[in-house]
C-alpha cells in the first residue's frame, strides 16, 4: 500500500482499536463501497439529538475524470435518494461549510467465527466508512452521469440495455447527492477462530464443541418475471452478472477463512 | 397493527416520504433488527462534524422482563463492542441526558427490481431504524444476560453448547451497551416493477428488455473447521440453524416479490 494510493490518516478515520485490521487504500475502500448492495448514510439533523441513518443506493465515481481507476485514485460518492432540502438548507445557513457533513458506511459479512467460548466468537467482515461533505447535484450532465454509474454499478450494462435517456420529468424528480470524500478507512477481519489456552487443554471441551467458520455471502436467486414483462428469456448479461456475483461472493467468503495465517 | 403494539410516531421516526412503506409495530421492527447479521450504529462525536458509524453485533431484549415476547412489547437493544469511553463521558458532561443519543439501523436487501427504464428500478428491502440513549452496562448479571442473548441471537443454542460462563477476565474486557429505545420505525418495499405508461406501449422495448425481480438473501455455506477444531462432525444444531436460515432467506426473498399486489 503506497502512500500515494491511500486516503490521509486524520483523527476522524484512524482505526485505533485493533489497528492491524485497518486499511486506508483506495482499492480496498472503493471495492467495499461499490460491491455492497446497500450503503448506510448518516448525518446530523439539528431538530433532534439522534443522527439520521438512511439506507441508500450509490457508488463511487469521479465526474471530473470519468475514466479514473477507482483502485488508484480518490473518488466522490454518488447517492441516489431523497434527503430533506430543509437539512441542506440548515447546513448552508450554518456558514462556510462546503456541504452537509455525511458519513457513508458499507459492511459485508463474510462468515461467523465460532470458538470454544462465546467470548472468542467473531465475524469475518469487510467494512468501509467514508467521511465527506454532501451537496445536491444540480448540473444535468453530472446527474445523468451519476444515474448511469449507479445503475450499472448494481447491474453492469443495464443502462444501455433499457430505455434511456430518462425523460425530463424523470430527471427532475431524481435526487442525486455527491459526497466529496474528506477521509475514509476500512476494517477487514479474516481467518479462523482464536482460542483461550486453558480451553484448548480441556480435551472434553475440544472434542465436544465444533469450532471454525460458517461462510456467508449474498446469493442471487432465479429471476422472477414481473407481471408486465414481455421479454421471453432473462437476458444473458443479467444471468452472467448473477452467476458471477454468486461465484465471487462464495469464493471471497471461503478465501477469507484461509487468510490471516 | 394495534396502537398498543407500536412505537410512538414522533417527529424523529415518522416516515414522510413513501409513507405507505412505513411500519411502527414491535414485531416488524424487532424482527428486522434481530435477523440482520450486522447493525449500523451511529452517534455524534463532538470532536468533528461527521457522525460516527460503526458496524456492531447486537439484538433486542428486556432485562427487566426476560420472557417478554419481542413481537408484542417494547425492547432495549444490546450491542456488543467498543465505543470510546471519552464519548460517553462527553455525553455525561453535557448535562441531563440519559445517555448517548444513538441511532441503530438494520437493512435486509430482498431483491433487485428491474424496470423498462432505470428511473423505475428499485429494490425490495426491509429496513429498521431505532433511536435511543445508550449507556455502558455495568451490572454483571445484565452483562451476562446480554452476552448470552447476543450469542444465541446469532446462533441459537451456541451459548449452552460452548464453554460458559465467561471467565472474570473475559467479563471485564467485554463492553456491552444498552440502548433504551425512544422511538423506531421500519420501511418495507415489496412487489415487482412499476412502469411508465409510455414505455409499456413501446412493443419493441417491452419485447427486448427483461423486467422483474432478482431475489437475494444471505446464504450460509458449508462450515469450515478451524485449525484447532477437535470435534469430528459439525454439531446438529449448527446445521439445523444454517439450513433453516438459508431456507427462510430464500422464501422471504421470493415471497416479497408476490406481495404488495
Image: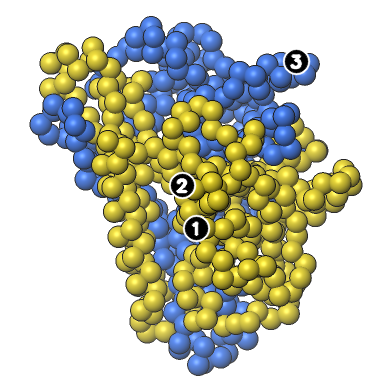
Chain colours: A blue, B yellow
Can you say whether A17 is above or below A44 in the image? below
Q: Using the image, name the chain to which the residue with label 2 belongs.
A: B
Rounded to the nearest whole Å, what is the CA distance between mark 1 and mark 2?
A: 11 Å
Label 3: element kind: helix
* Disc 2 residue crowd, few under 14, some 14–19, many 20+, Cα 10 Å: few
Q: Using the image, name the chain to which the residue with label 3 belongs.
A: A
Q: Is residue B133 visible?
A: yes
Rounded to the nearest whole Å, what is the CA distance between mark 3 and mark 1?
A: 43 Å
Position of B165 compared to B93: left or right?
A: left
Rounded to the nearest whole Å, what is the CA distance between mark 3 and mark 2?
A: 41 Å
- Residue topped by disc 2: B1
- Give A30 or B160, whichever is nearer the viewer: B160
- Pair 1/2: label in front: 2
- Residue topped by disc 3: A93
Residue at the image point whose x is 65% and y is 19% from the top: A86
Quarter holding the C terminus of chain B?
A: top left
Earlier residue among tags 1 and 2: 2
Image coordinates of residue A63 in percent, x first then y, are 50, 17
- Give B242 or A84, whichever is nearer the viewer: A84
Can you say whether B118 is above or below B27 in the image? above
Name which quarter of the figure residue A197 lies in. Answer: bottom right
- Pair 3/2: label in front: 2
Q: Decide: marks 1, 2 in contact (CB < 8 A)?
A: no
Residue at the image point whose x is 68% and y is 16% from the top: A89
Residue at the image point whose x is 19% and y is 24% from the top: B209
Amino acid at each position: 500500500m503506497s502512500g500515494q494510493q491511500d486516503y490521509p490518516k486524520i483523527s476522524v478515520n484512524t482505526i485505533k482499536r485493533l489497528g492491524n485490521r485497518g486499511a486506508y487504500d483506495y482499492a480496498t475502500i472503493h471495492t467495499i463501497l461499490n460491491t455492497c448492495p446497500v450503503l448506510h448514510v448518516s448525518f446530523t439533523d439539528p431538530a433532534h439529538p439522534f443522527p439520521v441513518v438512511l439506507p441508500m443506493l450509490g457508488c463511487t465515481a469521479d465526474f471530473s475524470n470519468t475514466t479514473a481507476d477507482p483502485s488508484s485514485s480518490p473518488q466522490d460518492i454518488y447517492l441516489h435518494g431523497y434527503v430533506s432540502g430543509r437539512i441542506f438548507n440548515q447546513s448552508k445557513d450554518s456558514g462556510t461549510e462546503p456541504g452537509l457533513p455525511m458519513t457513508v458506511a458499507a459492511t459485508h459479512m463474510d462468515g461467523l467465527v465460532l470458538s470454544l467460548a462465546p467470548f472468542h466468537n467473531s465475524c469475518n467482515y469487510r467494512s468501509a466508512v467514508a467521511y465527506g461533505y454532501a451537496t445536491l447535484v444540480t448540473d444535468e450532465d453530472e446527474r445523468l452521469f451519476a444515474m448511469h454509474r449507479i445503475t450499472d454499478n448494481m447491474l453492469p450494462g443495464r443502462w444501455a440495455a433499457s430505455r434511456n435517456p430518462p425523460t425530463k420529468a424523470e430527471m427532475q424528480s431524481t435526487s442525486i447527492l455527491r459526497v466529496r470524500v474528506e477521509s475514509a478507512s476500512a476494517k477487514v477481519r479474516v481467518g479462523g477462530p482464536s482460542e483461550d489456552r486453558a480451553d484448548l487443554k480441556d480435551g472434553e471441551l475440544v472434542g465436544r464443541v465444533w469450532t471454525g467458520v460458517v461462510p456467508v455471502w449474498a446469493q442471487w436467486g432465479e429471476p422472477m418475471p414481473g407481471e408486465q414483462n414481455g421479454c421471453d428469456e432473462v437476458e444473458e448479461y443479467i444471468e452472467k452478472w448473477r452467476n458471477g456475483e454468486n461465484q465471487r461472493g462464495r469464493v471471497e467468503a471461503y478465501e477469507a477463512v484461509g487468510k490471516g495465517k
